[in-house]
Amino acid sequence: MKNPRALAVQIGFMLLPIAISLAVAAALVISVGRDPLEVVDALWKGAFKDSRKLGGVFNFWIPLTLVSIGLVVTFRAGLWNIGVEGQMMMGALFASWGAQFILMDESLSPLLNVILIALAALGGMFWAFVVGLLKIRLGVNEIFGGVALNALVNVISIYLISGPWQPRIGGSAQGTEPFPTASLLPEFSSTFPVNLFMIALVIAAFLIVLVLLNATRWGLNLKAVGANMRSALLLGVATERTSMSAFLVCGALAGIAGSYRVLFTFDNLRPLASGGIGFLGLLVVLLLSIRLLWVPLIAFAFAAILTGSTRLQIVVKLDASLAGVLQGMLVLFVILFHGVQEVFFPGTLADEDDTSDPSPMHQGGEFRAQRKSLPHGDGADLEGVR
Amino acid sequence: MDIELRNIHKRFGPVHANNDINVKFSHGRIVGILGENGAGKSTLMKILSGFQPADEGEILIDNDIIDYTGPAAAIANGIGMLQQDPLDVGAFTVLENFIYGGADGITLKRAEALAQLQNLSARFGFELDPYQPIDNLLIAERQQLEIIRLLALGVETLILDEPTTGISADQKEILFNALRRLAHDEGLVVLLVSHKLEDVIDLCDEVVVLRDGLITGAMDMPASDDNLTGAVIARTKQQLVTMMFGEALEAEQRPHYQIGAPVLAAKALVVQDQRLDMQPISMTAHAGEVIGLAGLGGSGQELFMRACARLGRIDSGGLDFDGGSSLKTSYRQLFQRGCVFGAAGRLEEGLIAGLTLTEHSALVADDKLQIDWKTVEKQTASRIERYRVKGRASDTIEQLSGGNQQRVLIGLLPDDPKLLILEQPTRGLDVDSARWIWTQLLERCQRGTAIIFNSADLEELVTYSDRIFVFYAGRVHEVPDVGQTTIDELGHLIGGEF
């Protein structure tokens, strides 16, 4: 498939940014007089010391993987769905409404769980639909629309928490009252506190989206619209519908992720319940140049570092934000090196697609299109000339 | 300056675009570089002008081996190339474009540059307003600017790629006179890449012909001060065609088909534009009819075509497609009813860089969610064969040469649309390829498709159109008797003489 030199360059360019970010992080730790190995040990133990800790990692992994899968879809369509955070939050709001007002007997808890998750998916889709509508009908860039809607949903949630949904006693802006047990997602066990149904859902979503992206017309349409909306329109692709469908799929997955935060991680609705996981999903997907296949793995690594970093404060007396620094650097270096590789070793780039794509790329570096891996182009206003 | 290319090789994957090219260009000569699409002439010129390096081989200037990379270095060595689409900076004025790219040091010597610009313009009879923004210039004027810019940089070898596309008869005469003067009086080497054999015979002193990456022929052209009779031109043309294609081509005569019911009717259609004073346009296209739109680039024909396809704004008037008003219709809806638009910029509008030929086929195949890759691969293979595309199904579209991209684009058009609106359907194609494309298009006409197309190639317009509309600065004029119109008459019409 590829010659050995190309393969070597490719592997080098995968490992180098990771090595450099680790080195920089280590230098940072040393400069404040701590031992980097101590930090590694703390991170490791914080994430994997026992099954409870591991449960904590899954606790992050579930919503992070869901939003990342959704973001692969929107990125494939050339859309920067930065509103994913708000879509999570809107999902959380919808689920919270159901958790408080759809009252069922505890024996019907599984049914109620499914209803609440479906409600959350609807909520996320609703918020994504607004972003899509602004983009497609009114030409509002999805980044601006997304940022505005993120802020708006936060205001709405604070209003609900401190207004209509405030606890009967001691109402503050801390959160709603704990939801009835029937609506909460059950733990597998107290030593491994995760929800298995949700893990199954994540895996199902991953597989379904993988097949949809790589083996169906919808996936091909997304790719075409993402690469060149104007050409796609002229070739007869329903560009507006395709863009909107990408938003809706991402919104649904983000909404489900949001429901997990309020129905499992917490047991009530809090301000900023989405916890920045949507934004972290953007990093995961950028790190992978929009390759879906590795999303669960990288999301797991991110979740492990995040979970482990809570121990940094206690053990090494370093702020937990060191984990964020490491993640940020990792993304920067990976993107940087991707650019370097494209400019200097154009023939060695990894194939964009993972599986059944019938189009293995060739090594015709000379003719390669500009930057393929990140979405480019804007202008959803093409189809809407009336 | 004399130039010699020795043992030049260039490969693109499996394609040997230049295969051991050895050629000399002498000062004071105008040399035509001929060849069909993909013959390797553009590659060779790009190597000479520094846009891409050769894999092997040497370039000698005045018998010294010169090694350079990049267009700037080529210009420093006295070799400059005029691209088909002039690479100037739109928002700048003529003067700013003239200065930019040339200035050494930090300060711009405006007054000096202005004097030089006016000096050079006057010498070649160019009329360039130094303070006009480039956006307002015609293609011919942008070419003129680019020529004197390169001359001011000290270029002694001037390469022109299809310079007569999109300019009027008068502008062509000005250009040719300037080029003759540069070569014959001032001793420059002028290299002309062109598909238009009449132009080559008119202007060049000699030609070099490439085929499949090899030089397959060279000959002197009849001197233009001899009597260039029609017979001489026809004979020379036939010789050149034989060298280019290995066989003689018959003169093209198109059959005309039964004209059917109206498909598209524009009624006093107004498309407003900041730069053009667009007049109301009324025009009806019938099934089986080919309507050619002539005019210099930016005379309003592009706006009109896009408005008809509902890809552009309509300010007033009426537009009917297939019996109903399409004023409130989107392109997507028109597309589903059989109106298809083909844009001139292939990779910008029409094809999708990064997608393979197979994926392009799949995009237009059907609407089912599940893609039947087996069938799509078969369709792709048959398209490649039917449209004689040089490329593999698994190639991404940008790996193909421009001519082959155009064939793919035409190949992706639906089989029986009601209306095809095509921007420059054969732009950049050689004679043989262009005829092939038209055979495909006319087959559709025979089955009842109406075609509206524009072209910078006047011969194409005269050959294939049932009716011709000339656009000039937003005004429209229908050519009364297309059967009797000559290319020369049309050349004057597009210059606004109606």
Image (cartoon, rainbow, N blue to C red):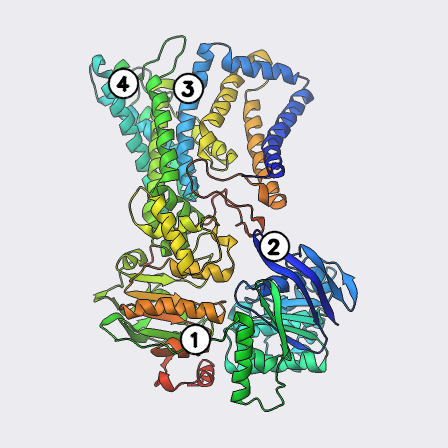
Judging by the rendered image, the residue that carries numbered circle 2 is B11
- Which chain is disc 1 placed on? B
Q: Which mark's residue is nearer the viewer, 4 or 2?
A: 2
User: As drawn, is A345 to the left or to the right of B324?
Assistant: right
Judging by the rendered image, the residue that carries numbered circle 1 is B460
Q: Mark 1 Cα within 10 Å, few/some/many (few <14, many 20+)? A: many
Q: Along the polypeptide, which appears first: circle 4 or circle 3?
A: 3
Q: CA distance from mark 1 to mark 3?
A: 68 Å
Helix, strand or loop under label 3? helix
Q: Along the polypeptide, which appears first: circle 2 or circle 1?
A: 2
In this view of the protein, can residue A209 be seen by the observer?
yes
Amino acid identity at mark 2? Arg
Q: CA distance from mark 4 to mark 1?
A: 73 Å
Instruction: Specify the quadrant that holds the C terminus of chain A.
Output: bottom left
* x then y, percent, for residue B355: 45, 48
Helix, strand or loop under label 1? helix
Judging by the rendered image, the residue that carries numbered circle 4 is A183
